Amino acid sequence: MLRTLFFLTGFFPWTLLVLLVSLPLSLMGPDILHHWARLWARGSLWLAGVEVRCRGGEHLRPGAAMVYMPNHQSNFDILALLACIRPPFRWLAKKELFAIPLFGAAMRRAGCIAVDRGDHQSAVASLDEAARRIHNGEAVMIFPEGTRSLNGRLLPFKKGGFLTAIKAQAPVLPIAITGSGGILPKHGRSLRPGVISVTFLPPIETRALSLEDRDLLMERVRASLDALLGERGAETS
């Protein structure tokens, strides 16, 4: 409980400070906000008493079009991913986040793509926008489960992100995250210090795939994540 109070006491002022400093600098381009977001993430992890261990960095391709696909256990996944990935990338994020004062403005200026889960036509348009930007050389982060797992085990994958990767003809980089569910699980109100491991797995190419191969790509990504996560994916206790 003391760690949770310490984190909350420091997190909101720290976040506000980073936003106030970074928003004017965003006039220089969206990539500058990525570097400030990494600073924010590392500071937030320190406040929470969380160590992040990054592995498989050789699979990252700085400056290349790519679709990052991590499993999702906790809101701390976002901080851990930012801490580990130096090259700029864009987030595919739910529309509600863009309504948060200052934070939403920072997301828009950072080039994040809003998805309205309640409007299928709008969601498809957002995924098409993501495919266009990936095809033009950007990297985009998509959580294929669409939400956080309650027990750390992989949820069924949403199909949209895989169609996006195939349309962009860009490789998918599976990312296995373990440990975050034990720090702050979904619906949890108190956090526990600990270690989060982020492992970048070998990219899965899509250049020979068509839209009809969507399910095949989903199976390949899931198998890649399952091979590393196994029982470790259920680290929520």
Image: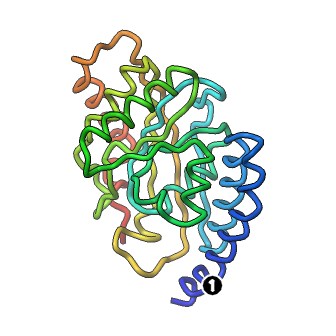
The residue that disc 1 covers is: 9
- Residue 197 in percent (x, y) is at 52, 53
Numbered marks: total: 1
Residue 150 as seen in the image, left or right of residue 26: left
Residue 26 as seen in the image, left or right of residue 193: right
The quadrant where residue 58 appears:
top right
The quadrant where residue 209 appears:
top left
Residue at coordinates 55% horizontally, 21% vertically from top-left?
136
Residue 195 as seen in the image, left or right of residue 63: left
Mark 1 crowdedness (10 Å alpha carbons): few <14, some 14-19, many ≥20: few
- Residue 139 in percent (x, y) is at 55, 32
Amino acid type, label 1:
Thr
- Residue 3 in percent (x, y) is at 57, 84
Residue at coordinates 48% horizontally, 40% vertically from top-left?
141
Residue 219 as seen in the image, left or right of residue 237: left
Residue at coordinates 24% horizontally, 23% vertically from top-left?
216
- Way the structure is coloured: rainbow
The quadrant where residue 237 appears:
bottom left
Residue at coordinates 61% horizontally, 36% vertically from top-left?
57
Residue farthest top in this picture: 208
- Please tell me which residue lies in front, 181 or 227: 181
- Residue 187 in percent (x, y) is at 34, 73
Determine the secondary structure under disc 1.
helix
Up-down: is 215 above or below 30?
above
Up-down: is 3 above or below 202?
below
